[in-house]
Image (cartoon, grey):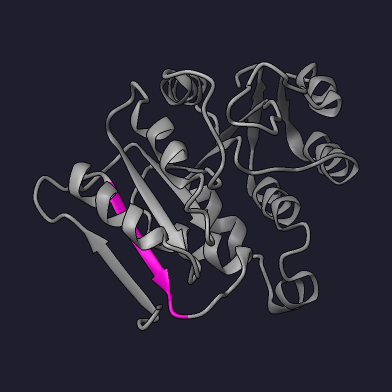
Amino acid sequence: TCIEEKLIYQLKENLQSNPLISIIVPSYSKEKVIMKSIRSIQNQSLRNIEILIVDDCSTDDSNTYYNELLRTDHRIRIVKHMKNMGVWRTRIDGFLYSRGEYIIHFDAGDLYSDNYVLEDAYKVVKKHHLNSIKMTFRLFFNYNNLSYNLIPSNLLKINKTKIIYGSKNIENYNKLIFAGWGNIWTRLTHSDIIFRGLNLLNTQILNLYKNLWEDNWWNILINKVSRNFLVIKRI
C-alpha cells in the first residue's frame, strides 16, 4: 500500500552527490518488466549515474523488486506516490528529485540496445555543447525475441536534419513531433533546459491533456527554450 505522499528510499552510504546523468523511470504495476529494464541501465558503461524510480502507487508486488534493487546498487533512489497521479506528474516529480547534470527518461519496459548508449550520448552532447540530443529507437513486442524490430520511419526522416538550430527549424520539428510520436525516452537533455521548459507548463495544458500526448508536450516545452539539439542514429 502507498501510505506516504512521497517516500524516498535510498542507501545513504557512497551516494553520489553529482551524477552526470539522472535516469528517471516512471513505473506503475510493472513488476513483470521492471527488473530487466533496470538491469539494462545498470549495465551501462557510464557509471556516474543515478537511477530514479518513481512509483505511481503500484498495485502489484513491485515493492519486492525495489527492495532487492536498493540492496545491490547505491545509485538507485525510489520515490513513491500515495495515490495514482498519472504520467505527467510522475515524470515531473522524477525531475524535481533528480540531481544529474543531464536527464533522460526510461519507461519501465524499455531496454538499451547495448552497454554504451549513455556514454556515447553524453560524449556527443558535451563535445558539441548541445542543449540536448535525441536518439532513434526500435519497437519490440516480446522480450524473448528481440530480433523482430521496427524502426519508425518518421524518425529516420527527421534524422536527416542532423543538428537543428534556430527557432524556425525547431518550430518545424515541433510540427513533426505531432505528426509522428514525440517520445521523450530517447532524449538526453540538460537539467537547466528542462527546468526552463517546464516553467512554461500551465495548469490548463496539464488538466486539458492529462496523460494524453505528455511526451509530445514535454518535447515541445523543451524545444521552445532550446538553442539547439541533435538527432543521432543511436538506439
Residue 194: percent from left, percent from top: 54, 52
Q: Look at 75% across and 51% down and name the residue there.
A: 216
- Specify the quadrant that holds the N terminus: bottom left
Count numbered badges in the picture: 0
Q: For the view shown, which residue lies furthest in the left direction? A: 13
Left or right of residue 115: residue 59:
right
Q: Nearer the viewer, residue 29 or 186?
A: 29
Left or right of residue 23: residue 206:
right
Q: Is residue 153 above or below residue 199?
A: above
Q: Quadrant of residue 43?
A: top left
Q: Is residue 107 above or below residue 227?
A: below
Q: Nearer the viewer, residue 188 or 90?
A: 90
Q: Look at 37% across and 25% down and name the residue there.
A: 44
**Magenta residues, start to end:** 76-82
Q: Nearer the viewer, residue 139 or 219?
A: 139
- Specify the quadrant that holds the C terminus: top right
Residue 49: percent from left, percent from top: 32, 38
Q: Look at 48% across and 72% down and name the residue there.
A: 57
> Is residue 110 rendered magenta in the image?
no
Residue 91: percent from left, percent from top: 54, 59
Q: Is residue 185 above or below residue 199?
A: above
Main SS of the magenta part reads: strand
Q: Look at 33% across and 21% down and name the residue there.
A: 45
Q: Is residue 93 above or below residue 151?
A: below
Residue 225: percent from left, percent from top: 64, 49
Left or right of residue 169: residue 188:
left
Left or right of residue 147: residue 150:
right
